[in-house]
């Protein structure tokens, strides 16, 4: 009888260990430490509503800043551009780690420092991070109030940490 209970107990412990391993792999996605993706989007251009003979004007820079690393090494530049009345966040020369559930936010928190502070205040969510490396454009909603926003952050929503942030004076 003892041998039968010990055998059932061993199977139960093994089953629990397998479930815990699968859950841990799903939550942490450890393979992302070894993956990268690259995207090279063109600089947005101002488009005219009517055909014109002059070249389109260049986008106007409203703010810019250089990324600082936080939970993961992050490099590159963030620029907020006015493209003919539309606003775009452009990430240039971005290089960051891959991770689960990464997003791009504009926030009222200052860049750098504690990596968990960015979801405590006001944020404008611009979408999922398109790639870990390269040049990327993120449209800013027309109704977004940029006054008082102080940084852009690459945010891991699953673990509530900033991979990196860049100061912006908006």
Image (spheres, grey):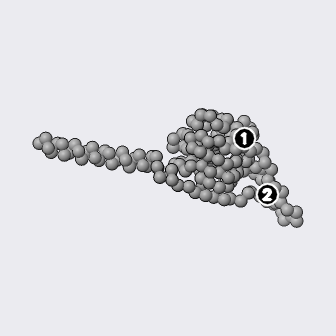
Report the Cα–Cα distance between label 1 and label 2.
22 Å
Say whether disc 1 or disc 2 marks the residue closer to the N-terminus.
2
Q: In the shown orientation, is residue 53 left or right of residue 147?
A: right
Q: Position of residue 142 (x, y in %)?
A: 72, 48
**Residue at point 68%, 42% (across, down):** 166
Q: Secondary structure at mark 2?
A: loop
Q: Secondary structure at mark 1?
A: loop
**Residue at point 70%, 48% (across, down):** 77
> Which quadrant holds the C terminus?
top right
Q: Which residue is mark 2?
A: 46
Q: In the shown orientation, is residue 137 left or right of residue 160?
A: right
Q: Which residue is mark 1?
A: 168
Pick the front one: 57 or 133: 133
Q: Position of residue 87 (x, y in %)?
A: 74, 49
Q: Residue furthest right?
A: 53
> Of the residues tagged 1 and 2, which is closer to the observer?
1
**Residue at point 62%, 46% (across, down):** 74
> Which quadrant holds the N terminus?
top left
Pick the front one: 162 or 157: 162
Whether residue 155 is visible here, answered yes or no, is no
Q: In the shown orientation, is residue 100 left or right of residue 26?
A: right
Q: Position of residue 135 (x, y in %)?
A: 67, 55
Within 10 Å of the Cα at label 2, are there few (<14), some (14-19), or many (20+) other Cα atoms? some
Whether residue 161 is visible here, answered yes or no, is yes
């Amino acid at each position: 009888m003892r041998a039968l209970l010990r055998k059932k107990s061993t199977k139960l412990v093994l089953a629990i260990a397998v479930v815990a391993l699968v859950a841990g792999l799903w939550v942490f996605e450890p393979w992302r430490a070894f993956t990268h993706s690259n995207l090279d989007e063109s600089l947005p251009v101002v488009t005219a509503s009517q055909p014109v003979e002059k070249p389109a004007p260049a986008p106007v820079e409203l703010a810019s800043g250089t990324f600082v690393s936080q939970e993961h090494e992050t490099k590159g530049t963030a620029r907020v551009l006015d493209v003919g009345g539309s606003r775009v966040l452009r990430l240039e020369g971005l290089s960051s780690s891959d991770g689960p559930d990464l997003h791009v936010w504009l926030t009222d928190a200052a860049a750098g420092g504690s990596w968990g502070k960015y979801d405590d205040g006001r944020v404008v969510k611009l979408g999922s991070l398109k790639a870990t490396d390269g040049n990327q454009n993120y449209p800013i909603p027309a109704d977004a109030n940029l006054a008082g926003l102080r940084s852009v952050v690459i945010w891991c929503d699953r673990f509530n940490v900033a991979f990196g942030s860049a100061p912006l004076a908006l």
